[in-house]
Amino acid sequence: MQTSDYQRLDRAHHLHPFTDFKALGEEGSRIIERGEGVYIIDSEGNRILDGMAGLWCVNLGYGREELVEAATAQMRQLPYYNNFFKTTHPPAVKLAETLCRLAPPHINRVFFTGSGSEANDTVLRMVRRYWALKGQPEKQWVIGRENAYHGSTVAGLSLGGMAPMHEQGGPLVPKIAHVRQPWWFGEGRFGEGRSEGQDPETFGRECAAALEAKILELGEENVAAFIAEPVQGAGGAIIPPASYWPAVKAVLAKYDILLVADEVICGFGRLGEWFGSVHYGLEPDLMPIAKGLSSGYLPIGGVLVGDRVADTLIEEGGEFFHGFTYSGHPTCAAVAQRNLELMEAEGVVERVRDDLGPYLAQRWQALAKHPLVGEARSLGLIGALELIDPATGERFDKALAVGNLCRDLCFASGLVMRSVGDTMIISPPLVISHAEIDELVDKARAALDATLARLAD
Ligand code: PLP
């Protein structure tokens, strides 16, 4: 079949996630046929550097035969069985042990799911159940952050703070509140009511103070948990000021509120540690995981459960009426296990921390001098560029959709970057080489130049 055949059938029958169906009908989809290392290859034979690792997940890159072999061997042996009702199978047990070995010491249990969204549904049930078992059933409120993404199930979108999703979502799950995100560029430096001379660290502490104010507004006796990503991914690769997490930790400790660190993006090496929480010295009670767990080769997620919650659920909880047909799916678990083994054997995480992260940071920072860029930031292998209008030094009018223009020009020049408003994001495979980082930065610069030229037209 040719590109146009795929596009015709796609238009006729396929409803894509997060897509304006009508616009897709006019333009037609890009058809991606193959992947090799950090590249994807489309149906016209174009090689495109995947600066987003798919959806922040193809950590080991494309085309790893070892993962194909792990899936094939497990499918021959036992393609599917469940973990319900006191049964299990070797891949789930091995993966549980591996995950708990890699996780911080206070985490020794995992509950498997099929995705990150299901992991966050599980989180919501677990935190409310935990407090009920502890004799504090009124502790039901969960506080998330504005503009956060925690999944597309009703619980996931309720925990998340994306206004357009809330508007389309119908009635949301009750007793979930949101506080501001620690996005210095957009809400500090260019925020409403910004004050002259305010600095990122003061702003970080203000965000933690906003959390405390929300806890007091809801009543500290009613708040069960706070959920946040160590670095907010889909919200715009928001790397918090250094003051933020220590101040948030202190607030949570003061009111005895559980911390849920959503590690769906930050986990498995993205920030140069096995978990983003380790980078920030957090000790979360619960860590939802997915994506990089299997390098995206097969769908699998889970919740890593700290001893405090796990011991209560186990000792006092009786049966937990919760689970998914594909919780700990053997083929997915075998692939995830192999993925983690390869990451360990190849020192992928250490390499991100000691070599690739610093190298990207230095190359990426050079883009801050581009007239269209107001800020360039990165940590490990996640990064963002904030676009500004060179004529005014201010942010662009949102309606101009400059970020989307830049993203499309980027794709045309052979690089996938994502735009969230006017924030351009990268999150490449963790096996990217120095030469490929150079290529990524050069292509990003070319896309910025092309965007500038278009704006001048
Ligand atoms: N949590 C975070 C931080 C995510 O970025 C995502 C997906 O992008 C999810 C949860 C949901 O994961 P999934 O798409 O596997 O359901």
Image (cartoon, grey):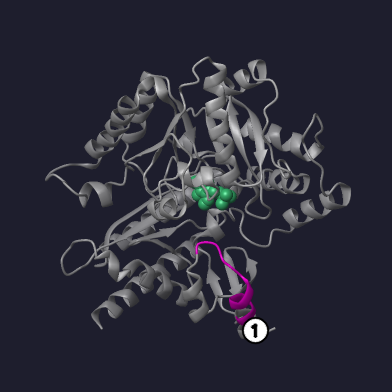
First to last magenta residue range? 8-18
Residue highlighted by disc 1? 5
Tag 1 secondary structure: helix
Residue 15 magenta-highlighted: yes
Percent position of residue 345, x then y: 67, 44
**Frontmost residue, 110 versus 68:** 110
Quarter holding the N terminus is bottom right
Q: In this image, 198 relative to 32: left or right?
A: left
Q: In this image, 163 relative to 396: left or right?
A: right
**Frontmost residue, 161 versus 140:** 140
Q: Is residue 6 above or below residue 40?
A: below
Q: Can residue 34 be spotted in the picture? A: yes
Q: How packed is label 1: few (under 14 Cα within 10 Å), some, or many (20 or more)?
A: few
**Frontmost residue, 271 versus 392:** 392
Q: In the image, what residue occupies the spot 50% across and 40% down?
A: 262
Q: Can residue 270 be spotted in the picture? A: no
Percent position of residue 261, x then y: 48, 36
Percent position of residue 312, x then y: 60, 18
Three-letter amino acid code of the residue under disc 1: Asp
Q: In this image, 48 relative to 229: left or right?
A: right
